[in-house]
Structures are given as structure tokens and as C-alpha cells.
Image: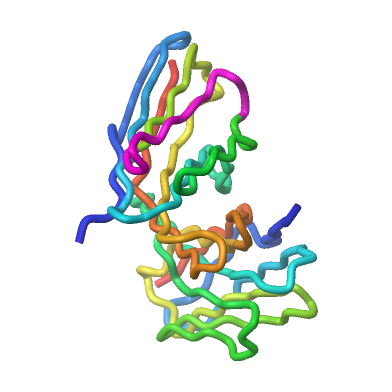
Amino acid sequence: AQTVTQSQPEMSVQEAETVTLSCTYDTSENNYYLFWYKQPPSRQMILVIRQEAYKQQNATENRFSVNFQKAAKSFSLKISDSQLGDTAMYFCAFMKNQFYFGTGTSLTVIP
Amino acid sequence: GAGVSQSPSNKVTEKGKDVELRCDPISGHTALYWYRQSLGQGLEFLIYFQGNSAPDKSGLPSDRFSAERTGGSVSTLTIQRTQQEDSAVYLCASSLELAGGRGEQFFGPGTRLTVL
């Protein structure tokens, strides 16, 4: 079975600074997908970024980028120029035939 | 465009009562998931439906939980004889395809269930 681990239950960052959220996973699969989802206080889960395991290039979406280390089974999320609206729970997810989610990291952006 | 919708948004019930939670996925999405999210916790997988295949019920916590998906579209999650530990937010998600696809899940806003 696949497992996803987010070892940082809570984090905070000053507005405009950069923060990195960690995620590791365990799998014997070679082809799969990885995701970061954001859940603000409104409760609506929103996709932040996606990475295909067969791609070596790290995915980037505006201020959000990932550091995908396939051999190390690591998939960290970097948020640059943090904004107050980035305050949310962030979930890392692994997908191969089914989704597996980490327990989340609560990020607070401090003004 | 229309996203995933869930109803009701909030449900308060008494212990021992049955409840039904509804999910309307995005039209054309073949995969549908139910998750449970307890306060401050991650997502606990409950069940998923993929096309006409038999659903994967491996995440259902007890036989009081069941789900149906009619006509490959709307899904209903039923909890019988509710207990206080069933109190949580129940999230539904749908995706266009599963195996071999890009697999992005689109989530509904959830139903907050409170069992008194």
C-alpha cells in the first residue's frame, strides 16, 4: 500500500517570504502522479500543482513550485512571495489507481 | 462551469438516526470518491466508484456506512444509526478518468455532519 507522510503539522511564514512544505511517500510503483491540494478555511479543496512521475522537470505554477526527488520519494512544495491568502491546510497526495493523502500541513501567513 | 456540489452543506442529527448525504459530480466524470475529514485531520478514504465497475468499499469504517451511485452520476452516502464519532466533514470528489489518466480530483464543498 502507498503511504504519504507530511511531517510538519503546522508552519508559519512572514508575508512575502518563501516557505517549503515537505512530503514523502512510499511506493513500489514507477509511474504515478503527485499533487498538492490547498484547503482554506472555506473548506473547498483546490488543486495547487501536479507532477507526473515520469517527468524529471519540476512542475511550476506561478508562485508555487515543487522539488520532486523520485529516488528519494520526496515531493516538497515551495511557496514564494507568500500572501495572506495562502493561509490554509495543504495536503500532499499520491495517485496510482487510487488517491492517498497525507495528514496535511497547516500554513499560516503572518502579515 | 458547474463544479462538484454536495447537499446538505450542514446536517445536525441525533444519535441513532440515519442520514443521507448527496454528491453531484461534474458531468462526464467517471470516477467519484467519498472522504471523511475529522476536525484537524487529513482525508480518510471511504469509497470510490469508477464507471460501471464494482465500487471499492475498502475504506468504509463499518457496515453502518454504505454508498450508491445511480446512473453513473449522483451518489448518496448513507450512515445508519449514527454515532457521535461519525461527526466530521464528508467530502466528495470526482475526476475524469482514473488509471492512465491525469487523475486530477475536483472536490465539492463538503457536508458537515454533527451527531448530538
Query: In the image, A93: left or right of B26?
Result: right
Closest to the observer, A9 or B91: B91
Q: Position of residue B108 (x, y in %)?
A: 35, 49
User: Where B14 falls versus B6 (above or below)?
Assistant: above
Residue situated furthest front in the rendering: B52
Residue depicted at 57% across the width and 48% down the height: B42
Residue situated furthest left in the rendering: B1
Q: Position of residue A77 (x, y in %)?
A: 57, 76
Query: In the image, A68: left or right of B1?
Result: right
Closest to the observer, A92 or B53: B53
Residue depicted at 59% across the width and 31% down the height: B60
Closest to the observer, B78 or B28: B28
On whether residue A63 falls in the magenta region, the answer is no
Q: Quadrant of the C terminus of chain B?
A: top left
Residue depicted at 38% across the width and 31% down the height: B76
Q: Quadrant of the N terminus of chain B?
A: bottom left
User: Where A55 falls versus B71 (above or below)?
Assistant: below
Q: Position of residue B61 (x, y in %)?
A: 62, 28
Query: In the image, A100: left or right of A88?
Result: right
Residue situated furthest bottom in the rendering: A57
Residue B23 appears in which quarter of the rendering? Answer: top left
Q: Position of residue B51 (x, y in %)?
A: 45, 48
Residue extent of the magenta highlight: B61-74
